Image (spheres, helix red, strand yellow):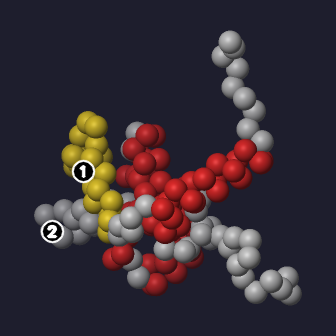
Amino acid sequence: MTDEKKATTFEDSAAQAERLEASARSEADSGTYTHVFKRPFTHGGVTYEHLTFDWESLSGKDSVAIERELRGEFTPESLAAMAARACTYRNTDGFRTVNTELLYALPLREFRQICSAARRFLLRSGSGRETEGGGSGSNA
């Protein structure tokens, strides 16, 4: 046995993306996700034990704002922006304090879990890329 990692090919990546999409589509449709931190996370003087994301609270206006800001669907940046807008956490004055800066400061594992939850929501809602057989069939 060796410790070498197998090189990932485009075909491997595409197959992995197809499996992820199929898995997300088979999940029960949940418009919310609650992320519970393994250890409390402190950022900007606020300690978070969990964050709840209400994907279904997002509107078309939110989508336009996210796309305008990032110009890319399913990028880590757009998923983080979506999560920041969907997060239900508010400070004692009722203001949003979770933004992309806070999400970027999270430990990698937790950042990826939150972005994956956003991606799964988009895939379940049909916001993914067109699959074969979809669309008009015209390249014009």
How packed mark 1 is, by other alpha carbons closer than 10 Å (few <14, some 14-19, many 20 or more), is: some
Cα separation, mark 2 vs mark 1, equals 19 Å
Quadrant for the N terminus, please: top right
- The residue mark sitting in front, 2 or 1, is 1
Q: Please provide percent x and percent y for residue 82.
A: 45, 66
Q: Secondary structure at mark 1?
A: strand
Q: Which residue is mark 1?
A: 50
Instruction: State the residue lying farthest toward the front.
Output: 26
Q: Which residue is mark 2?
A: 93
> Horizontally, is 105 left or right of 14 in the view?
left
Report whether residue 124 is seen: yes
Q: Please provide percent x and percent y for residue 67.
A: 56, 74
Q: Quadrant of residue 83?
A: bottom left
Residue at the image point whose x is 57% and y is 59% from the top: 22
Query: What's the amino acid at mark 1?
Result: His
Instruction: State the residue lying farthest toward the right.
Output: 140
Residue at the image point whose x is 28% and y is 37% from the top: 38
Q: Secondary structure at mark 2?
A: loop
Quadrant for the C terminus, please: bottom right
Against 95, residue 62 (above or below) is below
Q: Please provide percent x and percent y for residue 139.
A: 85, 82
Residue at the image point whose x is 69% and y is 50% from the top: 15
Q: How many marks?
A: 2
Query: What's the amino acid at mark 2?
Result: Asp
